[in-house]
Image (spheres, rainbow, N blue to C red):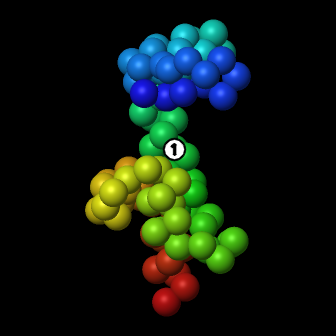
Amino acid sequence: MIISERTGRGFSAQSVVNTFYLWYRIMGFFGVSSHSGRRTFITNAAKKIDLVGGSLRDVQHLAGHKHLHTTQRYIEGDERAKKRIVNLV
């Protein structure tokens, strides 16, 4: 249950999913979901966390995951980044 700071009332997880679905459709995004937004956030945070002196453990806590391996499953690879890494070495 997610509690609104403004009203103090709770929202179910499904109502949050439905709200994101509606917002995405209003903005013209089709084929996306609250989950894909979450995956994008976690992937981007993992890529940039070292810029602020953080670690993957910080991303894990932001995601609300109990285990780091759960967070790791959300992080998507990047083919261009892999090529740049190989070129570094």
Question: Residue placed at 65% from the left, 18% from the top?
Answer: 7
User: Which residue is outermost to the bottom?
Assistant: 89
Provide residue 63's location: percent of width, then percent of height.
47, 50
- Residue farthest front in this picture: 8
Q: Secondary structure at mark 1?
A: helix
> Is residue 30 visible from the viewing direction of this image?
no
Say if 7 sits above or below 81 in the image.
above
Q: Is residue 48 left or right of residue 12?
A: right
In the rendered image, which quarter is residue 35 located in? top left
Looking at the picture, tell me which residue is in the foreground, 43 or 55: 55
Residue that appears at 53% across and 73% down: 55
Percent of width and height locating residue 66: 33, 57
Q: Where in the figure is residue 11, as x and y percent of width and height?
A: 48, 19
Q: Which residue is mark 1?
A: 40
Classify 69 as above or below 85: above
Residue found 60% across the figure and 73% down from its top: 54
Q: Eyeballing the image, is 3 above or below 14?
A: below
Q: Position of residue 60 (x, y in %)?
A: 44, 59
Where on the picture, by quarter, is residue 71? bottom left
Q: The residue under label 1 is which amino acid type? A: Thr
Q: Quadrant of the N terminus?
A: top left
Residue at image position (50%, 20%) is: 10
Residue 23 visible somewhere in the drawing: yes
